[in-house]
Amino acid sequence: MRSISAWLAAIAWCGALCAAPPKADSIFPASGKPGAPFEASIRGSGLEGAYSIWFEGAGGSAKVIAVEPEPASSDPKRKPGSVLRVEMRLDESASGARSFRVLTPGGVSNALRIYPHPEPSLLETAAPHDLPRQAQPLPLLPVAVQGRIAEVGEVDFYSFRAAAGEELTFRTISSEALDPGLAIYQLTGSWFDPDRATRLAFTDEPVSYPNLSTEAVLRYKFDAAGEYLVRVNGFWGHGGAGQEYTLRVTRGDVERQDEAKPREWTERKWTRPLSGDRMRELWARALPSLAAAAKPVPAVDADAEPTTAPVEPQKIQLPTMVTGAIERPGDIDRVRFAVKEGERIALEVETPDKTVPLINPYLRVIDSEGVEAFTNIYSTVNSNGNASKQIHPKTQYSFPRGGEFTLEIRDITASYGDKRMRYKVLVRPQAPHMGEVKVSVDCLNLEAGKAQKVSIVTDQEEGFDGYVIVSMEGLPEGVRAVPATEVDPDSPPQPPMGKRERFTTKSQKATLVLAPDASAPATRTPAIGRIYAQPVVKGELGTRILVKEIPVMVVKGAA
Amino acid sequence: MSTIRFAGGLSIAVCCAFAAGARIQSLRLVPAEAALSGKGASQQFAAIARMSDGTESDVTGQASFAVKDPAIAAARDAGRVFAAADGQTALEARVDGARAAAAIRVERSAEAKPFSFARDVGEIFTRRGCNGSRCHGGVKGQKGFKLSGNGIHPRDDYRWIVEGGVFQVLSAESGGPKVPRIDKANPEKSLLLTKAVMEVPHGGGRRFTKDSDDYRAMLDWVRAGAPYGETAAADASRVVKLETFPRDVVLPPGQKQRILVTARYSDGHTEDYTHRVSYVSNDGEVASVSGSGEIETKGPGETAVLLSAAGRSARIGVGVIGAPVANYPKTPAKSFIDEEVFAKLRRFNIVPSDLSGDAEFLRRACLDITGRIPPPDRVTEFVKSKNPNKRAEAIDLLLESPEYADYWTFRLSDLFRVSIFPVGINPKWTQDYYEWIRDGVEKDRPYSELASERIAAQGYSPASRHYLPYLVIPPAENMMGEQMRVFMGRRLDCAQCHDHPYEEWTQDQFWGMTAFFGPMFKLGGNPDSVIFDFPGGKEVAPDVASPTPLGVFHPRTKARVQPALLDGKTYPFEKTEFPRRELAAWMTSHPYFAEAAVNRIWSHFFGRGFVNPVDDFRSTNPPSHPELLAKLAAEFQRGGYRFKHVIRLIANSRTYQLASTPTPSNAVDKINYSHALPRPLDAEILLDAIGDVTGVRERFAVGTNRGEWRGGKTPMGTRAVELKEGDIYANNFFDAYGRPNRYSVPEREMSPKLAQALHLLAGNTYNERLSGKGSRGQALLARKAADLEIAAEFYLAAFARVPSVAEAEALEKLMASTPSREQAVQDLAWAVITSREFAENH
């Protein structure tokens, strides 16, 4: 009876999930040593029938071993998925994180990353090592420990020896589900408790700011030779399926894992690079002729000015890249510039070393009388009626009258400053151009005869009033991409938006419909669909810009 | 007369009761001379006898009074003289053959004082308690009728009565329909009168009767058209101070003391106010006070009698001493702490308890310094040690232990409000804030530095997180009020709406201090906001063409308030880059700061601060040991504002190490540190102690007691004091035993609750530990320990002592009579961990 039930359950599991598009949640181990094959488990849903692992570009290869149902979770709310076991090998020739997807009869999955590490791998043991006395030994350093916070509230202790004066770096690589913390201990005992471990150092990114890494890195110099412990934990005691990590312990520093460089153009991020070529880059997103005419942006060092008032700030011409640092609490750097009535300028800020909220550049433009013209603080009223304020990395302004103005650059607080709080502020005339282009999908699994839409949103920066042509190429056989219209949903009324024209951009949405013929053959490997955007200014065609590449497959529909 | 230093810091002349058998040697009258000016003027006298034992005693009640020339003045009641005609005469008092006289001069006896609303009507409100802070003098008044506290703003009071209108907090304007409280056409129907005599329902009850002088005075006033009366010049001469005789008193129980009150006016003249003030005793069990100003002592202790009139207040300290002790023992003093404490005990005839035993000391010190009970083997080791310095060495060891850092981080996390709201939302800042506190504790960083960083916190710094209890910046007045309470031990809140009724704080001062927090704002969305102060105090506002002034506006004047310290120094926004930093520097260097800090620390070790509550310093709530408080504060400052220095001083004092067993003379003493008072353990400490004794620890899960689990648990072995913010964990034990709400200035609710009793009987905290895997009981059974050995280990683990002979006999009998040995051990463990001795630090 039990045997029949198991079969029925297995069939039901397969039947329910066979047609679902694949979704990969995590991989264990989260990293691998290049050149050495290793077995990995990919957890997710819709992975049944997986037949291949598809690396984006060079980076690795993998062979599917088996797909199994995921064991039931201790969390009753969590629906178990499936586990794909593969044998993986990372290429030695490539560098940085490798991106891969799972191919199944249901199509191509989302991308997961796996990181290379040069150290020998060590698997976490099954024996409990939640307590300092139970720590799993790390016999040799350097090492990359492949572990998992398998249970809620679990912590993993590892023990190692360090020499006097030795400096070690501990760095985690983890799945998105795990926000790891690291701490170093020594088993010192105490008057109360002979098993007491004294914490020597710890780290957890204190900032949970959007887009900042949650990975933990800890560099520690050991004063005395001896046995020490390192502890890995999940923030606030989370744990369970998908909470995998690699703990790299190395002598000296561990190089950062190279993230794949985003191909997308970013317009309003604190860390986007602002170079002397910025004007050409901006105009290139309008017309080639304008880009060709653009000159390199000169730079001035705002810290070169004497800081003791009253000293006349340096005068700059537009455009100019103002560089400097908030060197001490309350430091204010200043430059002067002249504008004509109606002149439109843009201020762009890059914070190359730190970002908001650890550095908060406050830009303030005042006229010759000391009256404030504008700042980079955007004030709005939220739906609760409360004022909300944000500082922005880009601010646009149109001067109602001409004259000489002073730009003040400081941190919004009066409490922080050091030489590492660097900034670049580009003061420039506005350059109407096509800004960021956002694509709604990451991959496409098309069924023959069934259309799917792709939404493409283009930002039109600084008064750009041209058109943007969008197109898609590289599609599988029998699939066409055609423009389409759709009904815009009603928008709820917005609270007062303040001076949005200074801080936000206008955008337009285009829709492409991917229409596979009914006879379009199913594909075994993805085609690379390339989406282009091409600005058009006063009838003149701009450069066609590759916006995004996405894998596209044609799959068999459900029977 | 003897001189006794008294709570409140005053070195004063006091009146003492004469000992049984003492005779009156001489008599004097207070005041020695009096000038009665105006029609109906009066003066209250007190007769003070010098006794044969050298003490002085108030004998006003026993004395007979007579005026030499009855045509000039008349003596009525007990020592009260009324003007009759201009001239000079004398008042004579006699008691038991002793005589005393006082000169009396009467002037302008036919000249009635011009009517004054403040004096002739306003004082009735004060005397009858109508304008007290719990009645119409409260912030919002009562039922829409507001009076200024103790009549401090008579013109406002007049307007509310004559014109009507509903009082509005924080606004000088009235709200609602304006219905006068008097009826000039039908004076007897005036609400002011009908309410006071309860002809119409009145929440405050009957304040006087129709045949009283006060009723007649008010009725006459309404009949006269309800004038305000005072001229501008008279209005300008206001009472600036109330002076009392005596300033403080020390008496045995069952004695009486007449109070004399003199009002000093701004133009320099004085008037007898003895019968024009309102008297209230802070503690009626120690002393009561009559409406005419006669104190009657009840039981040993200290209290204060508060008196108020004409918008002013004063206090008289009352000490009720024990019976004289024959052969008062000499108690050795180890430090200035002991000198101060023991000297006061001597003055109050209270004998301190003996020095505590080693085990008692060790348990107490461990709990107070580290929040842990000592392990059994450590207790045995300590008790056996012959080292004469073992107590001092143990204190040093505890102070340097990692458990000290755990515990004082927990304590400061309470005070500094490490919290998350709402539970489950991105709480990283909480961890960061907690770690900032822990780092400060581990390194014993100067408390002044921590305070400065917290007060002036900006950016995304750990210390700035407390400014976002609900993810938004609280009102500036709340932030200021909290910093004052936490770091200066003062509550300015009353002055938010009006000048403080009993203190010197004015509304202007309140808003001046609040203005330091006015330019605060936050950047970004929740929960990762950056705290900042708009430079120059001007903000960029939505949809406003130019920056607008940001900050605090005075509720009465509507004017923008510039930051101003309590001492009046201002920091205009235009000239001050970061006003809050200036405030932090001022606060942490002010004497209040050190006083408030050591008072908190002292309170932790004794269960009661010199000032209690610890954040309620005020002239009407004076310290019990002012000199000691000042010396400790000076030591704190001298030691670089480091906690360990003060803790070491306190823990090494004999005062701290006194036994909890009382002596006959100190059994009822709760405030003079004559013996150790049992203090209930905080919920976290108790829970950890239960884990230590039973050997089974709690696992904490993020969530609520309604079963909403939020997906996180603490690592195995985590103690309750190590929880970064106890709020987020579902725990019935915490709920029953109290955990502070960290969204506002935390206060622990320590009173016993029914839920605790139920939890003792059926709660999982107790029962699961008794039978839990790996428990102490199981281990003892596994090694086949004898019954008495088991009992001794549980006793050592829980109480830091072995059972007494009687206890051992009883336990042995009980355990032997229980059929199941496992059950017997569980019963023993349950009895131990549910006992009062275990749940208290003593």
Image (tube, rainbow, N blue to C red):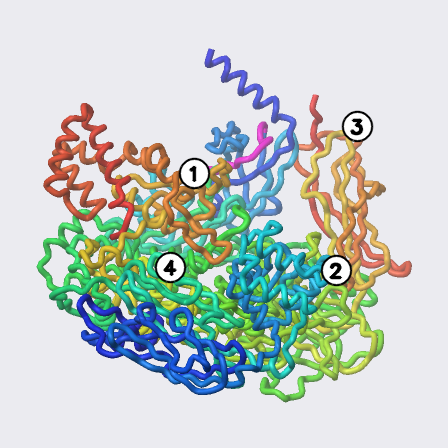
Residue A490 placement: quadrant: top right
Give the alpha-carbon distance from disc 2 to disc 3, as whole Å: 43 Å
Front residue of B364 and A490: B364
Give the alpha-carbon distance from disc 1 to disc 2, as whole Å: 44 Å
Q: Residue at x 19, y 64 (%)?
A: B654
Q: Are marks 1 and 4 in contact (CB under 8 Å)?
A: no
Disc 4: which residue: B283
Front residue of B824 and B326: B326
Disc 3: which residue: A518
Is residue A140 in view? yes
Closer to the eye: label 2 or 3: 2
- Which chain letter matches label 1? A
Could you tell me what secondary structure mostly forms the magenta stretch?
strand
Give the alpha-carbon distance from disc 3 to disc 1, as whole Å: 48 Å
Is B706 situated left or right of B783 in this image?
right
Q: Which is more N-terminal, label 2 or label 1?
A: 1
Q: Is residue B125 above or below residue B770?
A: below
Mark 3 neighbour density, 10 Å: few (under 14) some (14–19) many (20 or more): few
- Which chain letter matches label 2? A
Give the alpha-carbon distance from disc 4 to disc 3, as whole Å: 93 Å
Disc 2: which residue: A504
Three-letter code for the amino acid on which mark 1 is drawn = Glu
